[in-house]
């Protein structure tokens, strides 16, 4: 385990566990602060996750440890980060203003995403699923609507039939039904906090109708995980008044790249678009 990042080691520790929503919140908080996790007290972790201290103890027991001290001892044994390094990092953070800290947090999110992509197999599988779906349904509501629209905008340049659903309501299931009747085999979902109940319900319904669900979410423990066939986590930043989503956006672009690999006509479509755009004088360059 020493060759992987602290976040990756934590993810493996939590994989396959049947955790309650509160325990998933604790796990998510630990992954977000992976380098600090071995040095957090139960009180500090509880405050970080917004739960009670007994909840942290129950979480450790659910993972198979005698209590939180045993979990923390395990994390220290498998982590290459020592307390001095953690203290130095904390000292640096203290010298940065809130805007710089938000940027630093996003850099860390991107670093974790890079570690995740060391194994390209899940992304490659997702690319094949999305490329093969005719039409391709793309879902993202509320905070995730911009991610869905951005993905859909670029996907439409290379995929013959992309349908973006970025508003909820009573028509949502109808849109799923229409896509399925037209031949859709996959649904691409962007799910970011706070997670709308409509998204969870829509994914459950889509799977009932036979669609394969590929999801980019802020955490492997997000509420949509139980209704996703393939979930790729990409953390959001929470240091500002509104969450920042650089990692989910980049993950969307990575999936577009993987999807293009599964579309033999993708390059020809892009060249055709460029030719028509030049003829129309579409861009000022």
Image: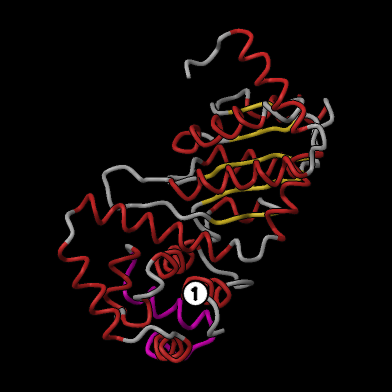
**Compared to 148, does 46 lie above or below?**
below
Instruction: Provide residue 204's location: percent of width, then percent of height.
Output: 67, 44
Q: Nearer the viewer, residue 251 or 205?
A: 251
Q: What's the image's color scheme?
A: secondary structure
Secondary structure of the residue carrying tag 1 is: loop
Q: Residue furthest front?
A: 285
Q: What's the residue at 16%, 66% (across, down)?
A: 94
Q: What are the residue bounds of the magenta stretch?
A: 51-69
Q: 202 left or right of 208?
A: left
**Compared to 131, does 15 lie above or below?**
below
The count of marks equals 1
The residue pinned by badge 1 equals 5
Dominant secondary structure of the magenta stretch? helix
How would you rate the neighbour count of disc 1 (Cα within 10 Å): few for under 14, some for 14-19, many for 20 or more? some
Q: Quadrant of the N terminus?
A: bottom right
Q: Nearer the viewer, residue 74 or 260?
A: 260
**Compared to 64, does 160 lie above or below?**
above
Q: What's the residue at 15%, 64% (across, down)?
A: 95
Instruction: Provide residue 34's location: percent of width, then percent of height.
Output: 41, 72
Instruction: Provide residue 35's location: percent of width, then percent of height.
Output: 38, 75
Q: Nearer the viewer, residue 256 or 143?
A: 256
Please identify the quarter of the rendering in which residue 60 is found: bottom left
* Residue 135 within the magenta-colored segment of the rendering: no
Instruction: Provide residue 182's location: percent of width, then percent of height.
Output: 83, 25
């Amino acid at each position: 385990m020493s060759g992987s990042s602290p976040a990756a080691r934590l993810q493996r520790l939590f994989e396959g566990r049947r955790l309650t929503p509160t325990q998933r919140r604790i796990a998510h908080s630990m992954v977000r602060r992976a380098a600090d996790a071995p040095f957090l007290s139960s009180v500090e972790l509880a405050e970080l996750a917004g739960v009670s201290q007994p909840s942290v103890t129950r979480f450790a027991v659910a993972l198979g440890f005698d209590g939180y001290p045993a979990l923390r001892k395990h994390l220290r044994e498998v982590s290459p980060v020592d307390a001095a390094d953690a203290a130095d990092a904390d000292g640096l953070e203290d010298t940065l203003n809130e805007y710089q800290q938000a940027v630093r947090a996003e850099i860390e999110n991107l670093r974790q995403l890079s570690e995740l992509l060391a194994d390209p197999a899940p992304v490659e599988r997702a690319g094949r699923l999305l490329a093969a779906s005719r039409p391709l349904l793309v879902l993202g509501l509320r905070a995730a609507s911009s991610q869905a629209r951005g993905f859909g905008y670029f996907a439409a340049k290379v995929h013959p039939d992309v349908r973006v659903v970025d508003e909820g309501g009573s028509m949502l299931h109808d849109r799923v039904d229409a896509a399925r009747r037209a031949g859709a085999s996959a649904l691409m979902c962007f799910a970011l906090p706070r997670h709308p109940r409509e998204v969870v319900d829509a994914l459950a319904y889509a799977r009932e109708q036979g669609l394969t669900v590929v999801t980019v979410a802020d955490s492997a423990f997000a509420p949509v995980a139980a209704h996703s066939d393939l979930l790729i986590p990409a953390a959001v930043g929470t240091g500002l008044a509104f969450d920042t989503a650089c990692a989910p956006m980049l993950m969307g672009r990575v999936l577009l790249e993987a999807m293009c690999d599964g579309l033999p006509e993708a390059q020809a479509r892009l060249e055709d678009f460029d030719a028509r755009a030049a003829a129309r004088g579409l861009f000022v360059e």
